[in-house]
Amino acid sequence: MKHLIAAFCMMCGSVSAESYSLGDLTITDSFSYPTNGRSGAGYFKLTNDGPADVLMAVTANFPRVMMHQSLMQEGVMTMKHRMMVEVPAQGELEFAPGGYHVMFMGLSDGWTVGDEIEASLQFKNAGMLDIKFSVTARP
């Protein structure tokens, strides 16, 4: 239960007001939290007003960028690498703390509030969409 409460609290933080569109796809609320470690995470909300698509990859200027999904298994939170993520037709997909997220690994410097992390989302059908993750304070 405490993991669910923590995940909910993290999702309630402030997020970027900027939105990005590509065809029927719209990305909103793209954000990251400050880090002083060697990795950071990115989150966003994707709305699809058209047919199903697939998020094939996320790229950025870091040594490794991967999509992960946090899962509760036998009372332990684990992360599973996802090679691709299905985008439902006429639906929403959320990358949020405690669920899907983008992992940026091999950071040389930490991120601070106000930084913007540039990345590109590669969709199977829609193509490439450049976005920025705004670094916001943790709730």
Image (spheres, grey):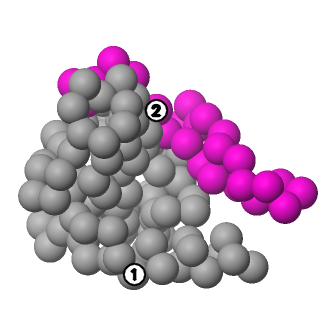
Q: Main secondary structure of the magenta part?
A: strand
Tell me the kind of residue under disc 1: Cys
Picture quadrant of residue 117: top left
The answer to whether residue 10 is above or below residue 108 is below
Question: Mark 1: which secondary structure?
Answer: loop
* Residue at point 61%, 35% (across, down): 81
Q: Nearer the viewer, residue 38 or 32?
A: 38
Magenta span of residues? 60-84
**Residue 127, how many percent across, how many down?**
28, 37
* Residue at point 39%, 81% (across, down): 12
Q: Is residue 4 magenta?
A: no
Image quarter in which the N terminus is found:
bottom right
Tell me the kind of residue under disc 2: Met
Q: Which residue is mark 1?
A: 12
Q: Nearer the viewer, residue 47 or 31?
A: 31
Q: Is residue 64 magenta?
A: yes
